Amino acid sequence: MFQSKLIIDNRDEDAEGKASFTRLDPISGTTATIAAAATADDARWAANAAAAAFPAWSAVGPTQRRAILLTAADRLVERSGEFAAAMTAETGATETWCRFNIELGAEILRDAAGMTTQVCGSLLPSDQGAMLSMGFRQPAGVCLGMAPWNAPIILGIRAIAMPLACGNTVVLKASELCPQTHRLIGELMIEAGTPPGVVNVVSNAPPDAEDIVEALVAHPAIRRVNFTGSTRVGRIVAQIAARHLKPCLLELGGKAPLLVLADADLDHAVEAAAFGAFFNQGQICMSTERIVLIDPIADEFAKRFAARASKLRAGDPRISGLALGSMIGTEAVQRVKALVDEALGKGARLLAGGTTHHSFMDATVLDHVTPRMRLYREESFGPVAALIRAQSIDEAVTIANDCQYGLSASVFGGDLGQAIAVARRIESGICHVNGATVSDDPHAPFGGVKASGYGRFGGQQAVDAFTELRWITVNSRREPYPL
């Protein structure tokens, strides 16, 4: 059992009145973590600490910031056992998913370290005579990062790494479902050398989430907000940020389509679809939820994919050795099972899986999914793949775009020119040709369109998001004014 306190000004702190909440292990139902339950005053305290630390941290040179981020990456790898233990206890993750989080989390830190020297502006032409005119980028101030439970290390680190690289201080609002895992990120950064107040971590009881977000976003020192999570909660965050005129970067839900064209390598497409649909029990924003099949290859793909999925069973990752672990809780299993049952009741065919027990669900494949079924459009966020038939490429593209979401997508085809042309027609922030929908490079522009959010994490786009662009001029001579 973990005891998780707030981190404010590089100190472990109890919440006001020593209030706490309990996070249960989704598999055993026993206590995983007793975490500090911050009040709005605690949240403001964390923002104040970050604000006080900002002037000095923003003046630190890129070499020192780079060294701290690189040290943090090394320490993350060294402490991988602690991170994996917390992540499994709080989310039911498999060893493979924990390792993936740790490895990619370290790469995100290293990539951010490399960007410390890329916070660049530009020289501008001027009509004002002999004058230096600059587009100048500088740290924005205190950045609020909010990360979810499903990829807690990857997304917790992503919420703060680039803001820190740009010279901002941060408040990380931990997920209520993995407070200890997110707290460890704060510990990591302090061990790496961030001064007091530069990284602060706040946890809160689930009923208090909206009050805590409101208090943090409203705080005058908070200048940037980034949130990764569901579209439902993302709308709330965006509305709060809009009321306070705070720029907001949102990476929200998804229902990624994978299109299999008639000339695709079916074995490759099957493997990519299985990975995309079932890795981490389908609890990834980029998970393959819809597989759109052109008629000539639909039956053959369905047969091969069902055979592959039928081998993917779920069990306790600490003892079973099975490919799939626990979903985040029994409520999630019941919600996904309801989508499956509703689709079967309206004519879909079950090709594999459908089996559930406690917080586990085996890899599940449904064929002949149609727009009449909720599974066609609603994000399942579970180990379920819906096969949808299309008579032509045009129809396949229409099906792919017939969705409120637009995060990730894939197109499989032998004719690369045709596959790229199809990819360009899909309404998504990310699209991979002959690759899985689940893919991540820290330096790539990561984000979605439509109900999947706006703004981009990664690379120069993240530098732009977490800095202030100012126009600064220097006059070399006295100018006459017309007044």
Image: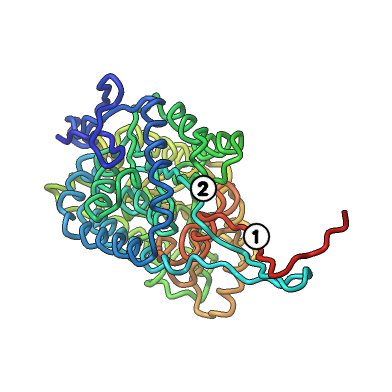
Q: Nearer the viewer, residue 120 or 79?
A: 120
Q: Nearer the viewer, residue 292 or 307?
A: 292
Q: Nearer the viewer, residue 477 or 402?
A: 477
Q: Examine the rendering and report whether any part of residue 253 can be seen.
A: no
Amino acid at circle 2: Leu
Identify which residue is drawn at 23% across, 31% down.
Answer: 24
**Extreme residue in the left direction:** 319
Quadrant of the image occupied by residue 10:
top left
Q: Is residue 261 left or right of residue 82?
A: right
Measured from the top left, where is residue 177 in percent x and y?
31, 36
Q: Nearer the viewer, residue 320 or 453?
A: 453
**Extreme residue in the top direction:** 17
Name the mark on residue 93. Answer: none
Q: Secondary structure at mark 2?
A: strand
Measured from the top left, where is residue 7 in percent x and y?
28, 38
Q: Is residue 216 left or right of residue 99?
A: right
Measured from the top left, where is residue 197 in percent x and y?
34, 43
Amino acid at circle 1: Trp
Q: Is residue 353 left or right of residue 255?
A: left
In this rendering, the count of numbered labels is 2
**Rendered view: 130 above or below 112:** below
Measured from the top left, where is residue 361 in percent x and y?
29, 43
Compute the Cα span from label 1 to label 2.
27 Å
Q: Secondary structure at mark 1?
A: strand
Q: Disc 1 designates what residue? A: 471
Q: Examine the rendering and report whether any part of residue 309 can be seen.
A: yes
Q: Disc 2 designates what residue? A: 250
Q: Quadrant of the N terminus?
A: top left
Mark 1 or 2 closer to N-term?
2
